[in-house]
Image: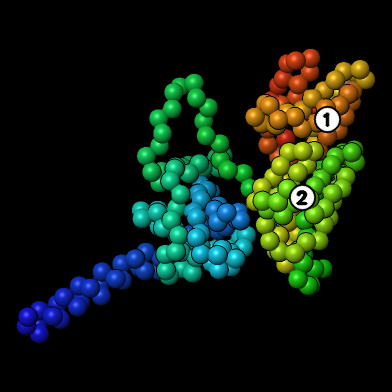
Amino acid sequence: MSPHRIVQLSLVVVCWLAVPLAAFAATPCCGVIGIEASGVVTASENATGREFQFRVADKAVLSSLHIGQAISADFATQKVSVDGATPCCGILAGPPAPRAGVTALPALSQPTVQSASAPAAQPLEPCCTVVANPALTGRLGRLVVAFPEGAKADGTNVKVFKANDAKDVANGYGNQAVDLLPGAYAVTVNGKRVEGVTIEAGHDTRVKVGVLRVVAGDATNVKVLDSDQKTALTNTYGKQELGFPVGTVYVSVAGQSEAVTIAEGKITDF
């Protein structure tokens, strides 16, 4: 092979190798909003608010991530870079769901065809808000569960678990502020479980909660079921103020149930 031909082939190889890196040379487009111990990470695109998930197989890379971290994503190749240069992880299959009021960009993959009666997919709602706390100067972070001002949620049970562990590491009632080592946790509020709660050193992780206020007679039995309409969360009588994580619960009275949406920082009457 002639020297001229060798030079041509070398240039082609160099250009080909540069293509994957060029895709991540731009300013990071997205931010991390959720990290699971399983390696599944949830991110949000800055320009549109649409959310997507990617899987991190490298434990060192996973441990280096934190809520709010800027990352780069190439939706054409469905690859993610956490350092802005090298693709490390694949975006999980399935179209992302836009947040309310945001126009959706083209889906990452072909959407599943739904019948006219099928409910629309709901956007993934981050469980928590993570904010820096200047008072925490050491290695610990703080888990905060704070119910709406004026709510009487002192009877609401709050438990904290290490991720994938059945034994609780903290257990209390009403508002909670628990100092913990950095890592992944789960929290139950009146039995409703919240996964993917990440604690960071020097930060408060505020679990998004609200209160369900039930107005009923003293002899009226009120059951609250999880979003699957099967798992019992609480069973009580009469007028109660019950704290829950944001999302949907079902209130059952006399064998009939109705969906109720728990909103962050709000008291919802039933």
- Looking at the figure, which quarter contains the C terminus? top right
* Residue situated furthest bottom in the rendering: 3
The quarter of the picture where residue 112 lies is: top left
Foreground residue among 150 and 85: 85
- Looking at the figure, which quarter contains the N terminus? bottom left
Pinpoint residue 120: horizontal percent, then vertical percent: 51, 30
Q: Amino acid at mark 2?
A: Lys
| Horizontal arrangement in the rendering, residue 7 relative to residue 59 (left or right) | left
Foreground residue among 157 and 79: 157
Q: Which mark is residue 49?
A: none
- The residue to which callout 2 is attached is 167
Q: Amino acid at mark 1?
A: Arg
Name the front one of labels 2 and 1.
2
Residue 33 seen in the figure: no
Measured along the vertical axis of the image, is residue 26 above or below residue 119?
Answer: below
* Residue situated furthest right in the rendering: 218
What colour scheme does the image use? Answer: rainbow
